[in-house]
Each structure stands twice: as C-alpha cells, then as structure tokens.
C-alpha cells in the first residue's frame, strides 16, 4: 500500500502565497496550460507558482527590485525572455523560504501588471502609514526678540 504524501513546507508556502495574491483586487487564477494555476489580474499574470506537490518556486515581475533580487544565490532572470522585462524566478532551499519577501514581490508584480484603477483600489484599502510629526529645519519658527 502506498503511503499518503504529507504536505511539505513548500506546499504550505505556495498555498499561503496563492491565497495572499488572490485577495488582491481583481486577482484570479489563470491556467495557461494543464497543471498550472498562475495568479493574474485582468488575464495578465503577475505571479507564477507551482502546483501542489512540486518544489517551491516563484516568478514575479519586479520592475524596481529585480537587481536586488538577482543578488540572491537562488534567483535568476525568468526564462522565455521574461527576464528582459524584469521577471525574476526564485527556487530557494526549503530552509530559506522568506514569505514576507515573496509577499512583497507579489505586491510589486501586481502593481506592475494591474490597471491603475485596481492599484488605486488597493491603495485606498491599505492602512495609511503613520508618520512622525516633526518639523524640518527649513520650517523653524522665529523666536521673539
């Protein structure tokens, strides 16, 4: 009798990242070929993730951070000419799954692929960043003499 395969850490990471991407405005699954479910917005893919049971890998369009991502030893430009457009693929070892970084990649890629209207919707739903109220040196008040 064959043993049931236990879900790997990579499977859990893939499921979490897929759920994160699908929570973005207008995001949906796109199946360009059997066995693949990519994250897309308006039918434009913004993240390639493997099906369950496959080794962890992720590919995203990173127009602003691709140069930094490519410094990681497990990253390379995405094949099929996508790397020329800022797409980066990562195949990290199981002990180096940085989900926070991959969520940031998914967001950056979504922003690059989504229509401006959906990006504005995302920004409107996000909590406003807190800013410390400080005066800049150029705006000093005059003291009374």
Image (cartoon, rainbow, N blue to C red):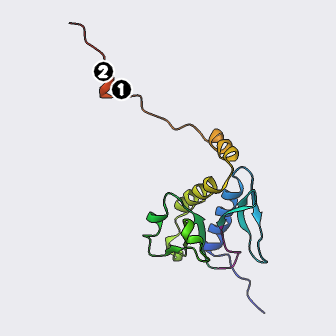
Residue highlighted by disc 1: 135
Q: Residue furthest left?
A: 145
Residue 125 lies in quadrant? top right
* Residues at circles 1 and 2 in contact by the CB criterion of under 8 Å: yes
- Is residue 49 one of those drawn in magenta? yes
Q: Is residue 21 above or below residue 36?
A: above
The residue that appears at 67% across and 75% down in the rendered structure is: 7
Judging depth in this view, the residue of 103 and 11 nearest the camera is 103
Tell me what residue is drawn at x 55 percent, y 76 percent: 91
Where's the C terminus, which quadrant?
top left
| Dominant SS type (magenta) | loop
**Which region of the structure is painted magenta?**
48-54
Labelled disc at residue 68: none
Q: Residues within 10 Å of mark 1 (few under 14, many from 20)?
A: few
Label 2 environment density (alpha carbons within 10 Å; few <14, some 14–19, many ≥20): few
Q: Is residue 127 left or right of residue 71?
A: right
Furthest residue toward top? 145
Residue 48 in view here: yes
Q: In screen coordinates, is 108 left or right of 38?
A: left
Say which element carries label 2. Answer: loop
**Viewer-proximal residue among 104 and 89:** 89
Residue 88 seen in the current view: no
Residue 2 horizontal/vertical position (percent): 76, 91
Which residue corresponds to mark 2?
140
Q: Quadrant of residue 87?
A: bottom right
Compared to 62, does 124 lie above or below?
above
């Amino acid at each position: 009798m064959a043993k049931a395969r236990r879900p790997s850490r990579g499977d859990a990471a893939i499921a979490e990242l897929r759920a994160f991407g699908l929570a973005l405005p207008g995001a949906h699954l796109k199946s360009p070929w059997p066995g693949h479910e990519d994250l897309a917005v308006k039918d434009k893919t913004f993240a390639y993730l493997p099906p369950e049971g496959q080794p962890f890998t992720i590919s995203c369009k990173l127009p602003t951070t691709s140069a930094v991502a490519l410094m990681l030893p497990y990253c390379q430009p995405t094949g099929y000419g996508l790397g020329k457009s800022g797409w980066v693929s990562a195949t990290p070892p199981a002990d180096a799954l940085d989900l926070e970084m991959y969520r940031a990649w998914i967001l950056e890629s979504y922003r690059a692929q989504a229509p401006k209207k959906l990006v504005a919707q995302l920004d409107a739903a996000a909590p406003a960043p807190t800013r410390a109220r400080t005066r800049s040196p150029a705006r000093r008040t005059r003291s009374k003499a």
